[in-house]
Image: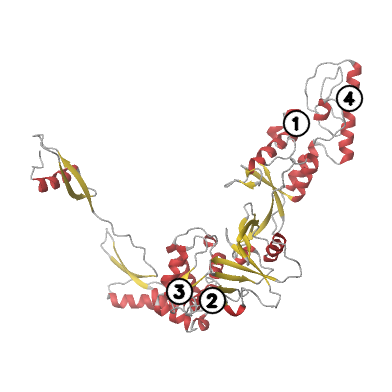
Amino acid sequence: MGRRGCGGSAAAQSGRPVRCAGDAHARRVGSFPLPPHPTPRLPQDSVRSRFFTFSVSVRVMAEGGVPDLDSQKNEIGNLLNTSLKKGDSWFLIDSRWFKQWKKYVGFDSWDMYSVGEHGMFPGPIDNSGLFADIETQALKEHLIDELDYVLVPTEAWNKLVSWYSCVVGQEPIVRKVVEHGMFVKHCKVEVYLLELKLCENNNMDNVVTRHFSKADTIDTIEKEMRKLFNISAEKETRLWNRYMTNTYEQLNKPDSTVQDAGLYQGQVLVIEQKNNDGTWPRQTSQTKSSGYGSSHNSSYYYRESHAPSQAGLCGLSNLGNTCFMNSALQCLSNTGPLTDYFLQGKYEEELNRENPLGMRGEIAEAYAELIKQMWSGRSSYVAPRMFKTQVGCFAPQFSGYQQQDSQELLAFLLDGLHEDLNRVKKKPYLELKDANGREDEVVAKEAWENHRLRNNSIIVDIFHGLFKSTLVCPQCSKISVTFDPFCYLTLPLPMKKDRTMEIFLVRADSSRPTQYRIIVPKMGAISDLCTALSQISGVAAEK
């Protein structure tokens, strides 16, 4: 009901029903629902005074814009069905407060027994239960939607605040709707913001932490940094990613979002001010274009160390926990025939942008540019940020900056490169044939030719092979031989079959215990242990 209303009794302000002497049933005053609730009889003057106060309270709420409980329930219920749209703002409300409000207004059918009760009044919106730190109002980690909090659209939030207000000193928890996915788009509210570390180029020890939405633009971050470091509007600035102590990359696309730019948790951003003589502290002559793919604006990679390095002897900066990706890329980079293929530009003639199983050639282009950087001889290490962003666009499981499985990434990359560079534009339908007693060489050649009719790329040339599979029917003893193509093998690591144990032998003659080291089977029995000990100590195993 809200806390507004004229002065008077507590019952009038709380919205509890006031009944005249002799009333047998609950009744409605205006449009306010009055559930049955027995009350003691009062003197006539007292009844008249309470009823008058309550009537005035209802009239003030109606005129002041606070609707009755039924209207609140309907208005908020309809707004909760609002569809998510990219860029819209939604607000978090502590589930405890929201559940109390639902009981107060009778939102659910099972909460109709205490509608309007004074003890059910939720009070001001209180989100303190969501904060890990009340002063900074930082959210607790691992909060769960519907269990810890509910999300309401802007209009619903504004209505609830106008009716109930907020706890003094608490800022609204507002979050943006962001879009995910490359081909199938879906929207969700970004509850946890990205933490970025901001500093000035001339004072990198002064690092300030701020949180941004993935939907925020680079221009938004730059404006925040200008305000934070008191940089005048007339001063020309530019932003840099800082990966390591001497590794920088320029952010030169203001309209790009945080998500598009591939910024990750804990990323350090540096703002640089132009010198009075028109030069920059970080001269662009020392930068070089990374040129990752046609779908992205070129960014700049900056390395303060100018010592030349050997071609191919190039490290990859760790972007968060991306060592799994770097290890796979280093393996492929040192696969000579594949690297020569990209360095010589042969991939450009074989890009298959129309392949429905491919990625429009973008993965191949991003990988090619990365290989060119690694083998240019100008860098001792590079930051594969744009390659990482491209991979995340097509494989959302790799879009974050947490640890992932290296073999899974390698399998995805090989398959993506193959489809992007498949020389077959239209795959024919082929019917597989059995060996029927023919020689293995003939059957294998036929299987390989059929495979190449549908799959023909540099990846097939280097990495693909054939498995020979033999099946014997247990009933008729017919033998079926097929040759199946493969790109990579998943093999178990060799495991030791034995283990070493240390045994103390205590003899019956009370002599000093003797320590022996024996080797026994891992899956062995006690008898194996006794036999091994007997061979070393000379004591019979049966003893």
Q: Nearer the viewer, residue 491 or 202?
A: 202
First in sequence: mark 1 vs mark 3? 1
Foreground tag (3 vs 4): 3
Q: Which mark is residue 51?
A: 4
**Quarter-wise, where is residue 6 in the image?**
top right
At label 3, which amino acid type do we have?
A: Cys
Q: Residues within 10 Å of mark 2 (few under 14, many from 20)?
A: many
Amino acid found under the numbered disc labelled 4:
Phe
Q: Is residue 452 left or right of residue 537?
A: right
| Residue at figure coordinates x 63%, y 57% from the top left | 208
The residue labelled by disc 1 is: 115
* Left or right relative to 53: residue 118: left
The tag on residue 365 is 2
Marks 3 and 4, how far apart in space?
A: 84 Å
- Near-viewer residue (117 or 208): 208
Task: Bin the neighbour count of mark 1 within 10 Å (Cα to Cα): few under 14, some 14-19, many 20 and up.
Answer: many
Element on which disc 4 rests: helix
Q: Nearer the viewer, residue 322 or 467?
A: 322
CA separation in Å, label 3 and label 2: 19 Å
Residue lying at 63% horizontally and 62% vertically, measured from the top left: 199
Instruction: Name the N-terminal-most of marks 4 and 2.
Output: 4
Q: Amino acid at mark 2?
A: Glu
Which of the marked residues, 2 or 1, is nearer the chain's N terminus?
1
- Return the residue at label 3: 314
Q: CA distance from mark 2 to mark 1?
A: 63 Å
